[in-house]
Image: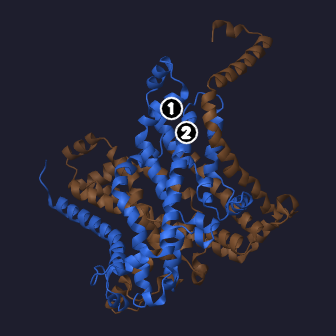
């Protein structure tokens, strides 16, 4: 290697400073909210909490996560995410398989039917009226059924299937294996990396969805975590949303409660994030535009 | 095709076409297992994607929910006249374009810079840590991000206003300020996605032939020159492609994001097509007008993305489909 010149040193300094600044910018809001959720009440109300906690208490967080509204919303979100992800990944992986057989008659036309829906949609109101006709308003299935297959995700899985060596299927067929046996015994097990990635994307999508529940769910008992969180974040009187007697919350500022609710809703994502990281970069690259 | 194929007379050519068609059906029948697998997906497509396209007809009606599409009065293009003449829509359209153009101009280059800069980092541990941190916001919901920024921008003890006051400034209520709201929208969109969007460019840099760097190095090119003359041109096709794709969604200024952040005080600067469709349609129950606005949005979006793909195929020989 050539020895480092002055220019290199300057470049390195710039590079590291830039990246550290970028990283801090991403972390500071998170750190600040976390600090507010665990800081002492007087410190929050007097505006003393910056990046680091002032004092330490878990009462606010405990209050928030033991509130019956929070628990219900949390459970609904967990249920919708689990069932939705299962249905989505199953439907997507199964539909992608025949579509990867481009030589079969009619398949390319069916592909066009799928891709067209990526480019053109009926818009909000026609969709809303359809859900209304199907009696899906205020029904949790509305959060799963209309979006159960993402065509984009399907294309990712399809191109993965296409990249598998054809000889595998041919030799299985010579051994007398039927289509479904091949799919479930050979293709799906071999595609686990991409299926895991796409399942993660679906799960994050269901967990984070706000638009769907906001439009189709207005019954309080069916609110998802994101809807509940939005109420708390944007409602100035967030204290009365925690469903506790006023006495309980006398010493808690709306600021603290808001911060604690944000933290409690972020933690599930933070917990699975390290496991996801292994997969998602691969997924993005398979999915990124190909020739 | 055998040699005999060229000698076929018209009659037997028709017969050949027929038998080819029959052959297709036979091929399909032999592979019926595959088509069976398509049935659930096709039913989904028909019910949830194509049925709403029929519902678009109400854009040409004065739709009444009790009469349905069949019973409602047809008004032709009246809703679209209303749209063109509506001052409110003009404002909404301008807001959409402004926010989108700000987002493209200010945020599109950032992931490219991040990728180029990350490529210069030799400490693998540092590189991986930074990547972990900057991809994270992508996985947080807009509601959570709103919550984060409401907290740090709060006028009562929020981090940012504390700093402003420390420098002797007046606290700013960013969320209810028509002056700052658009900047807030652009900044938070960047906060969420710049790291994630860099992945494509990082991969493109990784795909550049290492020999080019070595050759340049022997010719005496320093790291900055290698970055500007090898890395940057190396990812240029990807940059152009991503840019064309981005332009295709210019009418989506971030509906879900704005819905979680805005309030009536900032409608003037922050109401965009997506939020307008929602407010008019589900808030004021003006179904037909809202559908007309949505249809306008869909048609323009469709034209943009199809021509973008065409352009990309012409220029770069690759596209999204």
Q: Colour of chain B?
A: brown
Please rate how many residues cluster around mark 2, counting C-alpha atoms within 10 Å: few if below 14, some from 14 to 19, many from 20: many
Image coordinates for residue A73, horizontal then vertical, percent: 51, 68
Image coordinates for residue B168, horizontal then vertical, percent: 34, 93
**Circles 1 and 2 in contact, beta carbons < 8 Å:** yes
The circle drawn on residue B252 is none
For numbered disc 1, what is the local secondary structure?
A: helix
Sequence-wise first label, 1 or 2: 2
| Depicted B126 relative to depicted A183: above or below | below
Image coordinates for residue A146, horizontal then vertical, percent: 63, 54
| Depicted B85 relative to depicted A162: above or below | below
Q: Which residue is mark 1?
A: A183
| Depicted B304 relative to depicted B178: above or below | above
Q: Which residue is mark 2?
A: A94
For numbered disc 2, what is the local secondary structure?
A: helix
Q: Colour of chain A?
A: blue
């Amino acid at each position: 290697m050539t020895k480092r010149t002055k220019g290199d040193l300057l470049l390195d300094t710039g590079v590291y400073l830039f990246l550290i600044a970028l990283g801090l910018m991403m972390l500071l809001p998170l750190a600040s909210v976390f600090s507010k959720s665990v800081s002492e009440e007087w410190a929050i109300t007097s505006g003393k909490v910056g990046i680091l906690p002032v004092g330490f208490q878990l009462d606010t967080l405990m209050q928030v996560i033991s509130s019956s509204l929070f628990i219900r919303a949390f459970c609904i979100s967990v249920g919708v995410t689990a069932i939705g992800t299962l249905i989505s990944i199953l439907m997507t992986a199964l539909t992608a398989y025949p579509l990867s057989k481009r030589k079969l008659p009619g398949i390319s036309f069916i592909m066009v039917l799928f891709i067209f829906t990526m480019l053109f949609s009926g818009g909000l109101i026609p969709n809303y009226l359809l859900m209304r006709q199907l009696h899906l308003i205020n029904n949790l299935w509305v959060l799963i059924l209309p979006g159960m297959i993402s065509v984009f995700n399907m294309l990712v899985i399809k191109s993965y299937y296409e990249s598998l060596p054809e000889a595998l299927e041919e030799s299985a067929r010579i051994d007398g294996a039927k289509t479904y046996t091949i799919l479930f015994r050979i293709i799906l097990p071999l595609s686990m990396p991409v299926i895991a990635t796409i399942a993660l994307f679906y799960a994050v999508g269901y967990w984070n969805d706000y638009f769907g529940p906001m439009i189709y769910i207005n019954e309080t008992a069916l609110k998802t975590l994101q809807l509940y969180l939005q109420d708390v974040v944007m409602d100035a009187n967030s204290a009365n949303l925690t469903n506790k007697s006023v006495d309980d919350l006398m010493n808690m500022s709306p600021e603290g409660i808001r911060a604690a609710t944000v933290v409690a809703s972020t933690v599930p994502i933070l917990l699975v994030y390290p496991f996801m990281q292994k997969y998602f970069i691969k997924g993005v690259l398979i999915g990124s535009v190909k020739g | 095709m055998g040699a005999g194929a060229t000698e076929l007379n018209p009659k037997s050519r028709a017969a050949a076409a027929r038998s080819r068609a029959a052959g297709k059906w036979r091929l399909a029948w032999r592979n019926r297992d595959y088509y069976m697998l398509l049935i659930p997906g096709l039913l989904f497509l028909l019910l949830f994607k194509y049925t709403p396209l029929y519902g678009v007809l109400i854009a040409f009606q004065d739709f009444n929910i009790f009469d349905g599409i069949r019973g409602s009065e047809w008004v032709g293009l009246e809703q679209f006249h209303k749209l063109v003449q509506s001052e409110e829509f003009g404002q909404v359209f301008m807001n959409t374009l402004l926010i989108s153009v700000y987002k493209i101009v200010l945020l599109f280059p950032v992931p490219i810079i991040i990728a180029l800069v990350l490529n210069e980092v030799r400490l693998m541990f540092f590189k991986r840590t930074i990547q972990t941190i900057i991809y994270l916001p992508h996985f947080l919901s807009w509601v959570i991000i709103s919550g984060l920024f409401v907290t740090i921008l709060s006028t009562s003890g929020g981090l940012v206003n504390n700093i402003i006051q420390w420098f002797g400034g007046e606290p700013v209520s960013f969320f209810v300020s028509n002056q700052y709201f658009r900047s807030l929208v652009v900044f938070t969109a960047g906060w969420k996605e710049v790291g994630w969007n860099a992945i494509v460019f990082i991969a493109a840099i990784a795909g550049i032939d290492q020999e080019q760097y070595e050759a340049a190095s022997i010719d005496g090119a320093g790291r900055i020159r290698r970055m500007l003359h090898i890395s940057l041109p190396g990812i240029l096709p990807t940059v152009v492609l991503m840019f064309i794709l981005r332009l295709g969604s210019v009418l989506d200024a971030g509906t879900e994001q704005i819905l979680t952040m805005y309030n009536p005080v900032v409608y003037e600067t922050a109401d965009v097509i997506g939020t307008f469709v929602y407010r008019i349609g589900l808030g004021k129950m003006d179904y037909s007008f809202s559908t007309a606005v949505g249809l306008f949005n869909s048609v323009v979006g469709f034209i943009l993305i199809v021509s973008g793909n065409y352009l990309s195929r012409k220029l770069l020989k690759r596209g999204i489909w």
